[in-house]
Image (cartoon, coloured by chain):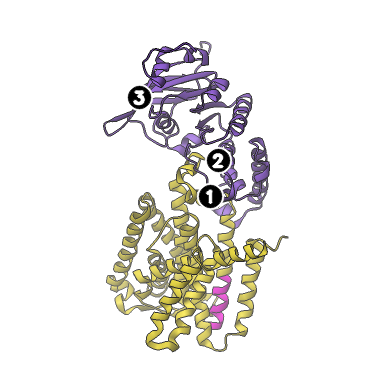
Amino acid sequence: MNWRTPRTGGLALLAAVILLLPLALVNNYWYEVAILIGINAIVCVGLNLLIGYAGQISLGHAGFFGLGAYGSAILSARYGWPPAAALAATTAGVALIALLVGRPILKLKGHYLAMATLGMGIIISIVIVTEDRLTGGPDGMSVPAFTLFGMSLAGERVWYWIIGGTLVGAVWFALNLIESPAGRALRALHGSEVGAQVSGIDATRAKVGVFVISAMFASVAGSMTAHYSGFITPGKVSFFHSIELVTMVVFGGMASTFGAVIGAAALTLLPQLLTVLKEYEMVVFGAVMVSTMIFFPRGLLPSLMLALARKRK
Amino acid sequence: MSAPQPVAQLSVTALSKAFGGVHAVDQLSFELDSGKVHSIIGPNGAGKTTLLNLLTGVYAPSSGSVTFEGSDVTGLAPHALAARGMARTFQNLQIFFNMSARENVMVGRHLRERTGWLAALLRFPSLAAGERESRDEAAELMRFVGLDDYLDADADAMPYGALKRLEIARALGGKPKLLLLDEPAAGLNPTETHEIDTLIARLAQSGVTVVLVEHNMRLVMGVSDHIVVLDYGRKLCEGSADQVRNDPRVIEAYLGRAELAPC
């Protein structure tokens, strides 16, 4: 087996980091941060398939994250569904919504697609805030703990392993997809849409497909967040969260699955580390962002890899 | 039942495309026989590239019809036409510069590969086997067009002449019945042009119908079985290289009406 390919070596490295990280997590607070990184990373890995590989923008993925969270919450809290069934049904429902929304809006390109996905995210957010009978409105709602085979899964230490395992799975899925004919079709679309079409690629089918897959990644992450935190508010459904997710993908490096993970980790961790700076937090955060994009224009990971490859030569 | 008539592989009837008031292609009709090398020539702006875009579904025609292998394919999307056996290259390269050269050719095989999402996400063993086959066949196609030196190159690190041939290799990946080449020799030096020349001849030998849009007359006259001359979106004349070369309308379209000194 070749350990230098992303699908073997990279995945093994990620698993090793997740396995060893608890040694450095001194208290529950840091477990919480690690879980948050994992959740964001799952969404970003999916979003990167859409943005980084297929070259389509979405400014509405927090909407899918929110649909996942609220779908699981409503089905399990209001209708008494077993959480595992709620998660499965919600993921399927979000996939269907993404399919129905994606078909018309993915015909748009560039700024127009950005506007359409932005609008979609805002509509989802408004629905969740106003349907207070179901969602609790701006006050949020509580969510029962996740139970599997009669076991209740609660606490940071349990969820660390669940999220960690899910992240490894998400990365594995993404790496598999990219190195397949379907994934090549996505990258081809990014390279030259007309070139891809005359090669027999159905552009609409490919774009809608990856849109649905990335929405499902976000939805699963949302469902897990709901059960893990036990309480959800519409804050995570907001437009700003969508922007945050896109920023993580671009920061870590577009068209790089591990870049998306690193972007999610860096931009989740950074605000936590910068809280010691109090009122200067946002200034330093902004400075870090700007200088990263100046010195690592392809994003953190791809730029570093390129520099490394050059050095070796 | 009557004996089947030998039908043309591609027939174009009264095909037109207008961009606003400009009739880029105007009431064009012609037929292309299977297994031959056909060239479409004409002065700049005659509508050659527009015609190619119409035939391959990149543009939808304003009126008229296109029949391919006996069925009406007018207005079909490019990927649907590719599925019926059409492939093409572009005058202004449409290479996937974000991929390796070999991956570019592998994309050309898209229609013959397992493209399901589930098989891809879970990497079914059959898919992994298909990938190996795909890599091998892509290498074979690259060797066929003379890209032996670029098997492991990234597309964005290749010279222009090699990219032209890479597009041909990608087009061949779909095992097309009809291959349309839009100015394959444009920007190439004489040696490279000669290589394209032999490549086209080899393609024709393998049974692929070739449609060539080209300005290099030496290349066109050398390889073509049949030439269609366009001017202002209309068909000026068609026929063999000799017929076209000696047609006064063609000379006039290219050189203008004047007293021609005997060569």
- Residue A179 sits above or below residue B182 on the image: below
**Location of the C terminus of chain A (image quadrant):** bottom right
Span colored in magenta: A156-166
Q: Main secondary structure of the magenta part?
A: helix
Q: Is residue B167 left or right of residue B46?
A: right
Q: Viewer-nearest of labels 3 and 1?
A: 3
- Residues A312 and A162: in front is A312
Secondary structure at badge 1 equals: loop
Q: Which chain appears yellow?
A: A
Q: Which residue is mark 3?
A: B232
- The number of numbered badges drawn on the structure is 3
Shown in purple, the chain is B
Q: Amino acid at mark 1?
A: Phe
Q: Give the chain of mark 3.
A: B
Q: Secondary structure at mark 2?
A: helix
- Residue B111 circle label: 2
Question: What's the distance in space between the residues labelled 1 and 2, CA to CA?
Answer: 21 Å
Q: Is residue A44 visible?
A: yes
Q: Assess disc 1: are there few (<14), some (14-19) or many (≥20) residues with their C-alpha within 10 Å of its C-alpha.
A: some
Name the N-terminal-most of marks 3 and 1.
Answer: 1
Q: Which residue is labeled 1 in the image? A: B97
